[in-house]
Image: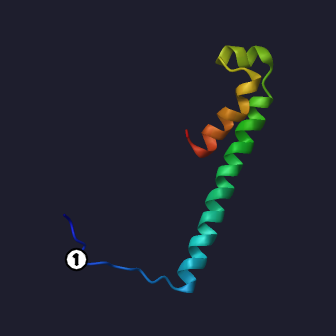
Amino acid sequence: MAYATEIRTVHLGLRDRVSAILKSFADAREQRKVYVRTLNELNALNDRDLADLGISAAQIPFIAREAAYGAK
């Protein structure tokens, strides 16, 4: 059986917490930018160009989501 002999807690100050929140908002904004840019670029392609890439129009939102947020 394993026992914890030392437990460390990190006390974040208000500045650290606000900074972390702002960073998460900035990260989410950048991901959203990638999603929208990818979506717009793929939607700008015609059916022939999409077929050359092996993509159907129905796959565009899924591809943009994967590009922005990673494969899940």
Residue 56 placement, left or right of 20: right
> Quadrant location of residue 9?
bottom left
Q: Residue 16 in the image: x percent, y percent? A: 53, 79
Q: Residue 62 in the image: x percent, y percent? A: 67, 34
> Quadrant location of residue 63?
top right
**Residue at the (52%, 85%) spot, across then down:** 13
> Quadrant location of residue 36?
top right
**Residue at the (56%, 72%) spot, across then down:** 20
Q: Amino acid at mark 1?
A: Thr
Q: Residue furthest left?
A: 1
Q: How is the image coloured?
A: rainbow
Q: How many residues crowd mark 1 within 10 Å: few (<14), some (14–19), many (20+)?
A: few
Q: Image height check: is 30 above or below 13? A: above
Q: Image height check: is 22 above or below 67? A: below
Q: Residue furthest front?
A: 1
Q: Image height check: is 28 above or below 63? A: below
Q: How many marks?
A: 1
Picture quarter with the C terminus: top right
Q: Nearer the viewer, residue 5 or 47?
A: 5
Q: Nearer the viewer, residue 2 or 44?
A: 2
Q: Residue 58 in the image: x percent, y percent? A: 75, 25
Residue 25 placement, left or right of 1: right
Q: Residue 69 in the image: x percent, y percent? A: 60, 45
**Residue at the (41%, 80%) spot, across then down:** 10
Q: Secondary structure at mark 1?
A: loop
Residue 31 placement, left or right of 42: left
Q: Which residue is mark 1?
A: 5
